[in-house]
């Protein structure tokens, strides 16, 4: 099953494609369209099909109603007479293209994977000179899905919380279209409360043989309330083991990650470990269960200390009053990331995948992304 869209001014439409102009607004009866007409325009350069015309989706979002599942998305981007620069986010604000450039006369096809869970496939455009010539959405059951179970350091934040970013939001960027990231992480959850709310059950509804389940909890397991607290010596590894057993029950691969560090430094410029026994519990469980471990705590420690106390702020959700529209009073958050930090931590996860030689994931990583 596939959907094909030809973007540009109202005129001839390529065969088997649906025409989308800068005035095509989303309507449920239509099933596709842009969410707003503002900052949208369209141009025709030549009479050639598909690459002869385009929409200029400056800070615009395109939506297509599709059944839930995984998709291979193919975009055609270019301009016959001008260079272009396009950034693109998909469902969950996952970054798939960042400042993607073409020169005048160049037309490029790019592919990436998208996981749809709410019946809509969304493409949000940015960049200095964005273009979209054509779009094809193809349902696929052949892709590998990386399921993410975790907390706010992993999650897909809502656009209203920009520039807040979890590393799971950025992981898609490091993979070709053969791999899809299904981010089920939710802020404020511990290994215990995630299960109690039925979120692991939700993952199990679609996870299948050959998929991966990445598990990172700890920040909220430390909290004192009964709904979330676990003990690092007993209940914490017991809950984590439920995720491992769930993945194994469908012949998927579980991967444990130690919690990414909070950004707190001592007087000597060394990072302060605020997770302590929870980190060692994950390492020990991975050894006992003979499953892959990405030591994200150690990797983030090295990154933060290499940058230093001052420079590392650029990765975290820090901002002066008025710097970020969604945090107009200013913010100083040493736990959560902004987009630059989300990409940096996702790069550490991708690095861990390569170091472990997690096949076949390693085969489908972008060669120049990390």
Image: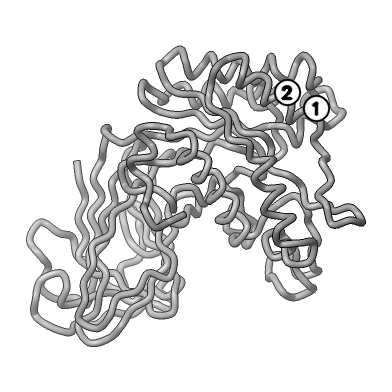
Measuring from the top left, give residue 152's x and y in whole percent.
Answer: 67, 43
Measuring from the top left, give residue 59's x and y in whole percent.
Answer: 46, 72
Q: Secondary structure at mark 1?
A: helix
Local crowd size for mark 1, using a 10 Å CA cut-off: few (<14), some (14–19), many (≥20): few
Find disc 1 in the rendering and name its residue.
Answer: 277
Coloring basis for residues: one colour
Left or right: 49 with respect to 358?
Answer: left
Q: Residue at x 43, y 32 (%)?
A: 358
Left or right: 322 with respect to 129?
Answer: right
Local crowd size for mark 2, using a 10 Å CA cut-off: few (<14), some (14–19), many (≥20): some
Note whether residue 157 is visible.
Answer: no
Q: Residue at x 51, y 24 (%)?
A: 254
Residue 281 image label: 2
- Distance between the Cα atoms at labels 2 and 1? 6 Å
**284 up-or-down from 80: above or below:** above
Measuring from the top left, give residue 114's x and y in whole percent.
Answer: 37, 46
């Amino acid at each position: 099953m596939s959907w094909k869209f030809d973007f540009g001014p109202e005129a001839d439409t390529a065969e088997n494609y649906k025409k989308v102009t800068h005035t095509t607004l989303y309507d449920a009866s239509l099933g596709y369209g842009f969410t707003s007409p503002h900052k949208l325009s369209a141009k025709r350069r030549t009479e050639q099909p598909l690459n002869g015309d385009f929409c200029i989706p400056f800070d615009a979002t395109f939506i297509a109603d599709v059944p839930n599942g995984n998709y291979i998305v193919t975009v055609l981007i270019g301009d016959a007479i001008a260079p272009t620069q396009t950034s693109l986010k998909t469902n969950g604000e996952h970054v798939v293209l960042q400042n993607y450039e073409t020169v005048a006369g160049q037309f490029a096809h790019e592919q990436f994977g998208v996981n749809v869970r709410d019946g809509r496939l969304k493409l949000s455009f940015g960049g200095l000179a964005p273009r979209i010539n054509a779009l094809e959405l193809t349902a696929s059951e052949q892709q590998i899905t990386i399921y993410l179970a975790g907390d706010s350091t992993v999650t897909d934040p809502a656009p209203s919380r920009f520039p807040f970013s979890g590393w799971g939001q950025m992981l898609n960027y490091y993979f070709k279209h053969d791999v899809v990231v299904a981010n089920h992480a939710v802020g404020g959850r511990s290994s215990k409360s995630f299960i109690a709310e039925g979120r692991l059950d939700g993952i199990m509804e679609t996870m299948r043989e050959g998929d991966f389940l990445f598990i990172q909890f700890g920040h909220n397991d430390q909290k004192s309330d009964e709904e979330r607290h676990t003990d690092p010596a007993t209940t914490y590894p017991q809950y984590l083991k439920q995720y491992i057993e769930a993945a194994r029950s469908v012949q998927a691969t579980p991967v444990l990650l130690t919690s990414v560090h909070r950004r707190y430094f001592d007087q000597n410029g060394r990072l302060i470990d605020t997770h302590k026994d929870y980190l060692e519990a994950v390492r020990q469980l991975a050894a006992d269960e003979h499953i892959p471990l990405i030591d994200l705590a150690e990797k983030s420690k090295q990154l933060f200390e290499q940058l230093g106390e001052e420079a590392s702020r650029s990765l975290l959700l820090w901002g002066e009053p008025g710097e970020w529209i969604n945090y107009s009073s200013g913010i100083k958050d040493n736990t959560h990331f902004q987009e630059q930090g989300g990409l940096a931590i996702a790069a550490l996860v991708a690095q861990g995948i390569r170091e472990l030689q997690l096949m076949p994931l390693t085969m489908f990583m972008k060669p120049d992304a990390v």
